[in-house]
Amino acid sequence: MFHSLLAYDYSLESKNIGSAAQCFFGLPEVMDEHNNGNMSNSCFVDMGESYLVIDSGPTYQYAKEAYSKIQKQKKLPISYVIDTHTHDDHWLGNGFYKSKGATIVGSIAFKELAILDITRMQRRISKEAYKGTKQVIPSIFVDGETTLYIGNKKVIITSVNHKAHTNSDLLIYIPSKRILFAGDIVFNGRLPSLRDGDISGWIETLQKIKKMNVDYIVGGHGRLYTKDAVNFTYEYLTTLKQEILKHIENGDEIGDTVNAVTMLKYKNIPFYDSIHKQNIETAYRTLEWENE
């Protein structure tokens, strides 16, 4: 990566997901001034006469670069951008696509989203990379299920409608492509974060995804995109829940449980040191309440 006089260069490279989509996969890292927020996935689906974008990325500059790279492969306008949830690494590129005439779609939770003076992303990355970024929320809100027709292709957008990774998760299914975009319901290559989530609701959603007849599942973080891509998150969360419930049933306090549930199988996975204990604490409080 290098810095130019005009804009930050993310050095993005897309990956073909069969013939269904092209994705820019983020790094399994915390956002900082080295990666400048390049930690989540952003995908382009060729719908015939236009592209559908799934998650616009962490900044205006990121979105601009991703768009430029895709246009060099096939020049099409952007008709819609769908934001999978309200975490800012997934939607702060909206402003670029709005400037290109795209319609932005997201969860109804965006209606209640506070517009911040300084975003989490802005605090952690360089001014150069953040340049031009504005908080542009969707103009179409999904609550329940919405179907878009782009060209002659159907796009089914389903709100999870209970807290899972967040209270704003959307699943995007394109039947003609046999592909599901699951946002941060699906992680791989790094531990998922329960910070804003509910472990039981998340597992319930994963169980539904596992039953879907699709060829590809693209998550919000991680480079796996086959149907098996769901397994890492599912196995981690189900094991975590089982272990915590054992301690709750034994009457163990939260501090003892946090120290006891090590799950060393995941010790060398990125974010284990920074997130695993936080996940235990969050899940313990949720499961303790469920058991009362």
Image (cartoon, rainbow, N blue to C red):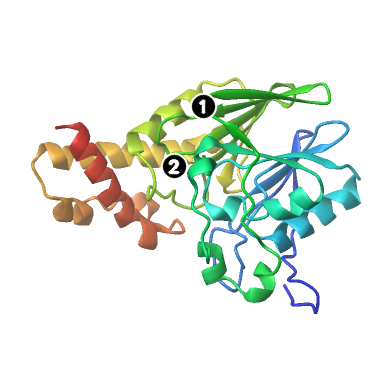
Neighbour tally class for label 2: few under 14, some 14-19, many 20 plus, Cα within 10 Å: many
Q: Residue 135: horizontal and vertical position, in percent?
A: 61, 56
- Horizontally, residue 33 falls left or right of residue 255, namely right
Q: Residue 35 versus residue 125: which sits nearer the camera?
A: 125
252 over 21 or under it: above or below: below
62 over 214 or under it: above or below: below
- Horizontally, residue 290 falls left or right of residue 274, namely left
Which amino acid does the dot numbered 2 rest on?
Answer: Thr
Q: Badge 1 is on which residue?
A: 209
Which amino acid does the dot numbered 1 rest on?
Answer: Ile
Which dot, 1 or 2, sits closer to the camera? 2
Query: What is the CA distance from the residue labelled 1 to the residue labelled 2?
Result: 16 Å
- Horizontally, residue 285 falls left or right of residue 140, namely left
Q: Residue 274: horizontal and vertical position, in percent?
A: 38, 62
Q: Residue at x 37, y 40 (%)?
A: 237
Which quarter of the rendered picture does the C terminus lie within? Answer: top left
Neighbour tally class for label 1: few under 14, some 14-19, many 20 plus, Cα within 10 Å: some
Q: Count the marks: how many? A: 2
Q: Secondary structure at mark 1?
A: helix
Residue 13 visible in the shown view: no
Q: Badge 2 is on which residue?
A: 166
Q: Residue 251 versus residue 291: which sits nearer the camera?
A: 291
Q: Residue 253 versus residue 103: which sits nearer the camera?
A: 103
Q: Residue at x 67, y 48 (%)?
A: 42
Q: Secondary structure at mark 2?
A: loop
Q: Are marks 1 and 2 in contact (CB under 8 Å)?
A: no
- Horizontally, residue 205 falls left or right of residue 28, namely left
